[in-house]
Image: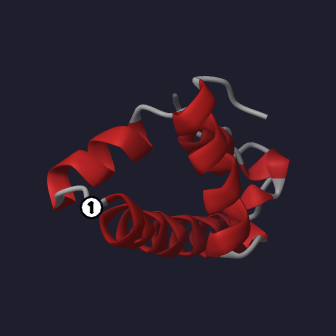
Amino acid sequence: MPIDFNHLTEEEQRDFEFLRERKLSQLAALLIEERGLSFNDAFRELYNSDTYTKLSDPRTGLYIQSARYIYSYLENELNTGKSN
């Protein structure tokens, strides 16, 4: 899914990308730690999730939430097959 940066300034784009990448790393670490996934499997689960799609859209504001908060959505999605 391409990121829609039309409404962001260049500085906001950089901030968003930095924060999103940081959250992705933290979420992958949580998947590895709490679910015992390998590095590759953790990122595969993450990148194939609706949570990732929402995290990649700056309009949702999800990227400014804590990794634990976002992980609760991801965990629910992985457990139920449904996103919030």
Q: Residue at x 59, y 74 (%)?
A: 19
Residue 40, image x, y percentages: 17, 51
Is 33 placed above or below 53 here? below
Q: Residue at x 46, y 67 (%)?
A: 21
Q: Is residue 61 left or right of residue 30?
A: right
Foreground: 40 or 20? Answer: 40
The residue tagged 1 is 36
Q: Is residue 30 left or right of residue 65?
A: left
From where the camera sits, is residue 48 visible? yes
Q: Residue furthest top?
A: 81
Q: Is residue 20 left or right of residue 13?
A: left
Foreground: 79 or 67? Answer: 79
From where the camera sits, is residue 50 visible? no
Is 51 placed above or below 13 here? above
Residue 43, image x, y percentages: 30, 51
Q: Quadrant of residue 11?
A: bottom right
Q: Quadrant of residue 3?
A: top right
Q: Residue at x 58, y 23 (%)?
A: 81
Residue 53, image x, y percentages: 59, 36
Element type where label 1 sits in the image: loop
How many C-alpha atoms fall within 10 Å of the one at disc 1: few (<14), some, or many (≥20)?
few
Can you say which quadrant of the picture contains the C terminus? top right
Q: Residue at x 62, y 28 (%)?
A: 80
Q: Quadrant of residue 33?
A: bottom left
